[in-house]
């Protein structure tokens, strides 16, 4: 079970990264080019957010299965002194939850925005911030951004 969810969570990152990249590129094109907010934009923005949500759910499940977080949960005091344990038990979760909050706020604000350019701009800003947090979090893990250990 641990291995299966770990692979799923690990592989799912590519959907998240590709969708975020696509949504952000389209948003900048729409914002800076003063374009209409198309149905295709709405869809890709929604999918990017939903895939982040699914990834978070997988992460939460993994948290209770992972050998690394089990060790940390058995001795929090010691785990906080160990860089790897602290990263997986605390930092990874906090950073990814922040990324989720950013993308969810961005999506919600964009839906409420009154003009098409404002919709694009909101997505461009919030989704870019979210992607930066995700990329920094993965890079900090010491594992490769693309690929697994
Ligand atoms: C840890 C689990 C999850 C949490 C905490 C969470 C949280 C949220 C929040 C706060 C919103 C509100 C966004 C808004 O007001 O616009 C939302 C919307 C949504 N979430 Fe999640 N979610 C989770 C998992 C999932 C999963 C697993 C899926 C899909 C399989 C999903 C799909 C959606 C969809 C479709 C929306 C509505 C988007 C819209 O049309 O506005 N979420 N979620
Ligand atoms: C956008 C959100 C997230 C992304 C992109 C993400 C990405 C990743 C990546 C790339 C790995 C390394 C996998 C490997 O080495 O093959 C990983 C591992 C892990 N993630 Fe996440 N993650 C996210 C959210 C979360 C959340 C919210 C939690 C917990 C609540 C979580 C828990 C874990 C755990 C426990 C591991 C380590 C598993 C192990 O090696 O035992 N992740 N994640």
Image: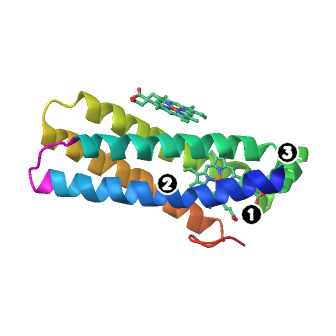
In the shown orientation, is residue 87 left or right of residue 67? left
Distance from the alpha carbon under mark 2 to that under mark 3: 28 Å
- What residue is at 44 percent from the left and 60 percent from the top? 18
**Label drawn at residue 73:** 3
- Residue closest to the eye, 142 or 32: 32
Which part of the image, by quadrant, shows the C terminus?
Answer: bottom right
Q: Residues within 10 Å of mark 1 (few under 14, many from 20)?
A: few
Specify whether 24 is left or right of 11.
left
- Pick whichever, 136 or 19, lies toward us: 19
Q: Which residue is mark 2?
A: 16
Tell me where the magenta segment starts and ends, as one range. Answer: 31-38
Q: How is the image coloured?
A: rainbow
Whether residue 49 is in magenta: the answer is: no
Residue 119, by quadrant, is top left
Q: Predominant secondary structure in magenta? A: loop
Task: Tell me what residue is drawn at x 71 percent, y 59 percent.
Answer: 7
Q: Is residue 36 magenta?
A: yes
Q: Position of residue 110 (x, y in %)?
A: 27, 36
Residue matched to label 1: 83
Tell which circle, 2 or 1, labels the residue nearer the N-terminal end. Answer: 2
């Amino acid at each position: 079970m641990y291995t299966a969810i770990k692979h799923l969570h690990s592989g799912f990152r590519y959907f998240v990264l590709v969708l975020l990249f696509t949504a952000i590129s389209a948003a900048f094109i729409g914002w800076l080019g003063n374009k209409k907010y198309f149905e295709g934009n709405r869809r890709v923005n929604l999918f990017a957010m939903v895939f982040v949500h699914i990834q978070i759910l997988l992460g939460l499940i993994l948290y209770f299965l992972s050998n690394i977080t089990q060790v940390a949960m058995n001795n929090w005091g010691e785990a906080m002194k160990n860089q790897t344990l602290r990263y997986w038990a605390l930092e990874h979760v906090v950073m990814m939850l922040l990324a989720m909050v950013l993308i969810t706020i961005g999506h919600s604000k964009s839906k409420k925005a009154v003009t098409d350019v404002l919709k694009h701009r909101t997505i461009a800003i919030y989704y870019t911030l979210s992607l930066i947090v995700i990329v920094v979090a993965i890079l900090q893990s010491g594992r490769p951004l693309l690929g697994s250990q």
